Every structure is written in C-alpha cells, then in structure tokens.
Image (spheres, rainbow, N blue to C red):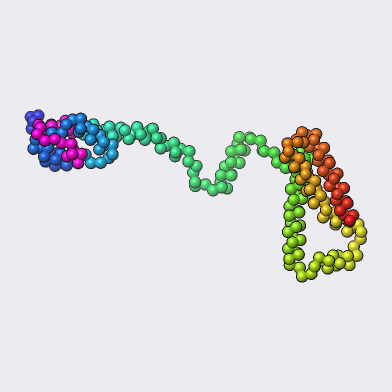
Amino acid sequence: MVAAKCCHENKCLEEGGLMSSSSARGERWPEPALSAELGRCAFLGTCAAPIIAVVRVKNGLPQRSCELRVLFMAVLQTRYVGRRCLLARLGPSLSVRHVVPMGTTAKEEMARFWEKNTKSNRPMSPHISIYKWSLPMAMSITHRGTGIALSLGVSLFGLAALLLPEQFPHYLAMVKSLSLGPALIYSAKFALAFPLSYHTWNGIRHLVWDLGKGFKIPQVNQSGVLVLILTLLSSAGLAAM
C-alpha cells in the first residue's frame, strides 16, 4: 500500500511539473544539493521545477516522492516564516504610524492648535502689547523704522531724479517761492535729518555690540541715551544748515 501511494504521488508530481519524466525513470536527487537548491529557489521566489531538473543525477534509485513533497512543503513554510520575520523586523507600520494626515488645510490645523492650547490652559507667548516698554526695546523698533524710512526716501528721490523733467535747483526754487515760515522749514529739515542721524549713530552702537562689548543692562541703557543725545544734536545741526 505504501509503494502504491508513493507511485501515485510520483505521478501527481510529474503531472504538476514538480518532478520531471526522467526522475520517474530511475534518477535520484541528492538530499544536500536538493535542499540547498530548493532553499535558494524558495527564497528567490522562483519555480522549483527547473532547479529539481538541474540537480538530479543519473544511475541511482528514485527518491520517494512523499519525502520530496515533505521537503518542498518545509521549504515553502520556511519561506513564509522568513518573510513574516523580515516584515516584522523592518516594521512597515513604523513608517505609517507617524505620517501626518494630508486631508486637512492650514486653517484647520491652526484652529486645532489654538483649541488644544485653550483646553490645556497654556499661557500666551509675550508680544508687543504685553511687554513693558523699555528704552532698548523702543530704540530697536525705531532703528528698524528709520531704516525703512531711509530706504523709501532714497528710492523716491532716485525715481524723482529719473522721471521729473527739471533739475533739482528748479524745484528748490519753487519751494522757496512758497514763502514758508522759518519754523516750518526748520521742522521739515529736522524731520528729514532725524532718520539719517539716528540710524547712523545707532548703527555704530550695533557695531560696538558686534565686538562683544556693552551687553550689560546698565551699559545698554547708557549707550541708548548717548545715541539719542547725539541724534538730536546732529539732526539740529543739519536742520540749521
């Protein structure tokens, strides 16, 4: 009965392509070579029939097909377990678990952020309406403002020089012909000289800071007062010219 069962399995394997016709004629596959080739074939995911045909040897007794089937099933099971272990080791879920969903807009994310802060009772970060004003803070803001004013003034003056048809003395004479009062003219000249004077003196103060000096709080306040005094004096002197 065992012999008949093995012959029936040999026939099934031959019809299924797992066993060549020459193997049924009395050819045998050595077990070490068969195990190695089946393992390599199963790992690479290729068909096992060509590998079996390559490793067979002639002039031997045929190997029982039941042992071949058990060996082949063991290799497939090892391949399945190896894949599962490899996927578990690589952890594909790790790369998906931390992915940010892309279905939300920036407005929704911002609303979610503020809702979370409100629920957590987190303190609001300090800003210009919360800080207590100090001299260094006011001078820092003024430095940026005067820089913007100077950039705009120089740009407008350059455009006027390029686009206006007359020369500068012509427009200066027009201003003098308006017969404006001395106080008004002095104030206008002072307003024009103040951004240049302040930005210049405070820029020198920043250069001193770049040298690593004057960072202590008393020194910062003293240098700020000195910059304001020099700015007023130089602006007044330029306006009087």
User: From the viewer's perspective, is 224 left or right of 28?
Assistant: right
The part of the image, by quadrant, that contains residue 40 is: top left
Residue under the point 64% across and 35% down:
122
| Image position of 109 with respect to 165: above or below | above
Which residue ends up furthest to the bottom in the rendered image?
A: 165
Could you tell me residue 198's position as x and y percent?
A: 80, 48
The N terminus - image quarter: top left
Could you tell me residue 180's position as x and y percent?
A: 90, 62
Let me know if residue 7 appears in the view: no
Let me know if residue 211 appears in the view: yes
Which segment is the magenta one? 50-71
64 in magenta: yes
Which residue ends up furthest to the front in the rendered image?
A: 211
- 160 or 134: nearer the eye? 160
Could you tell me residue 228's position as x and y percent?
A: 83, 44
Residue under the point 86% across and 53% down:
238
User: From the viewer's perspective, is 6 left or right of 134?
Assistant: left
The C terminus - image quarter: bottom right
The part of the image, by quadrant, that contains residue 11 is: top left
Could you tell me residue 62's position as x and y percent?
A: 11, 33
97 in magenta: no
Residue under the point 9% across and 34% down:
59
Residue under the point 14% across and 35% down:
57
How many dots with numbers?
0
| Image position of 240 with respect to 23: above or below | below
